[in-house]
């Protein structure tokens, strides 16, 4: 697979199992697919638990695959919990993400939408509510300002030289967060799937965050699911430039494709648009690798 467009590529947003939710594949399946496809590695994402220990097991059993751990600051880890973030850093976690399923917007939309239109992960929060667990949002801001715990978390991310991912925060919160992260010496920032409708960032907003050195993440799942318009996503990539973009898949849901397949198909579509291979590989190989450097 040395000549494949995805040779050496990383998927830094991969919903592999084991997880609370049913997944199409587990970490070991994904590791083998990484090796077979010639990719470089992946980052298993759970909305609920730290995956650093899982990553260590993958790397021991599949040394040709570089698996990196992540943790997302939802209620299951105590929300904006400096203690959990510090321990995650000690465990070798590479990516710390802000809240996703437990943001105020995510919770509100879950209960406002009809069941058939809810996000894949919504079944967990609705089931828990039915069992008496009242959903409590993890807020990163109040009255237009970041809450103090955010700064504590950012300092720990900087301490362990981890990557900050912005999660499902609102666009104004994300802009404040990215600016504050840079001020607190966080050197690696990923703006999570900037083109999805739920947390959409326009080009001007993305350019503002570029000033803090952030990378804009686009996910293939948005295209294959039909939730994101191709021309819009491609237009954003062209407007921002490939130097500050990474392509992930956000896949793992049973109805969607495998990450290597989704990534390959996305790259082929970019090729058909006329994008040069070196520009494509910058987004799937060079930029992720640079983010992961110690």
Image (tube, grey):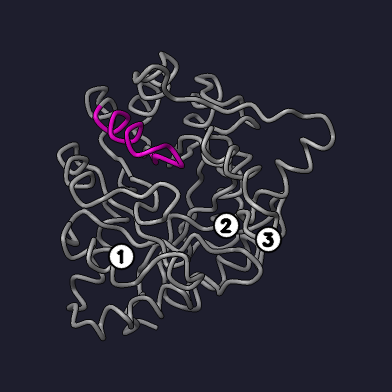
Task: Evaluate if marks 2 and 3 touch, with contact meaning CB atoms under 8 Å apart.
Answer: no
Secondary structure at numbered mark 2: loop
* Number of disc labels: 3
Secondary structure at numbered mark 1: helix
Q: Which residue is mark 2?
A: 15
Position of residue 53 measured from the top left corner of the image (x, y, whole percent): 60, 43
Rendered residue at 54%/55% (across/down): 59
Which of disc 1 and disc 3 is earlier in sequence? 3
Residue 209: name its quadrant. top left
Rendered residue at 66%/42% (across/down): 111
Q: Residues within 10 Å of mark 2 (few under 14, many from 20)?
A: many
Residue 22 is left or right of residue 51, and the answer is right
- The quadrant in which the C terminus is found is top left
- CA gap, disc 3 to disc 1? 25 Å
Rendered residue at 57%/43% (across/down): 109
Q: Which residue is mark 3?
A: 116
- The quadrant in which the N terminus is found is bottom left
Between disc 3 and disc 1, the foreground one is 3
- CA gap, disc 1 to disc 2? 21 Å
* Span highlighted in magenta in the image: 165-179
């Amino acid at each position: 697979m040395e000549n494949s467009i995805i040779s050496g590529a990383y998927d830094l947003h991969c919903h592999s199992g084991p997880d609370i939710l049913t997944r199409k594949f587990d970490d070991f399946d994904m590791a083998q697919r990484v090796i077979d496809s010639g990719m470089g590695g992946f980052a298993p994402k759970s909305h609920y638990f730290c995956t650093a220990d899982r990553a260590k097991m993958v790397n021991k059993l599949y040394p040709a695959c570089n698996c990196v751990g992540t943790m997302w600051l939802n209620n299951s880890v105590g929300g904006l919990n400096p203690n959990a973030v510090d321990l995650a850093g000690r465990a070798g976690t590479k990516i710390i993400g802000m809240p996703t399923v437990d943001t105020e917007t995510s919770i509100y939309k879950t209960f406002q939408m009809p069941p058939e239109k809810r996000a894949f992960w919504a079944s967990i929060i609705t089931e828990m509510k039915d069992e008496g667990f009242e959903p409590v949002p993890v807020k990163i801001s109040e009255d237009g300002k970041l809450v103090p715990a955010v700064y504590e978390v950012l300092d720990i991310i900087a301490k362990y030289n981890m990557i900050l991912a912005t999660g499902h925060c609102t666009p104004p919160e994300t802009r404040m967060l990215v600016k504050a992260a840079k001020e607190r010496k966080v050197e690696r920032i990923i703006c999570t799937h900037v083109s999805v409708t739920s947390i959409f960032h326009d080009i001007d907003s993305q350019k503002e965050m570029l000033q803090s050195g952030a990378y804009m993440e686009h996910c293939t799942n948005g295209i294959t699911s039909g939730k994101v318009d191709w021309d819009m996503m491609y237009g954003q990539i062209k407007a921002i430039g490939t130097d500050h973009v990474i392509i992930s898949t956000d896949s793992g849901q049973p109805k969607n494709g495998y990450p290597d397949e989704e990534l390959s198909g996305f790259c082929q579509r970019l090729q058909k648009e006329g994008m040069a291979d070196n520009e494509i590989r910058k987004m799937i190989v060079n930029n992720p690798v640079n983010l992961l450097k110690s």
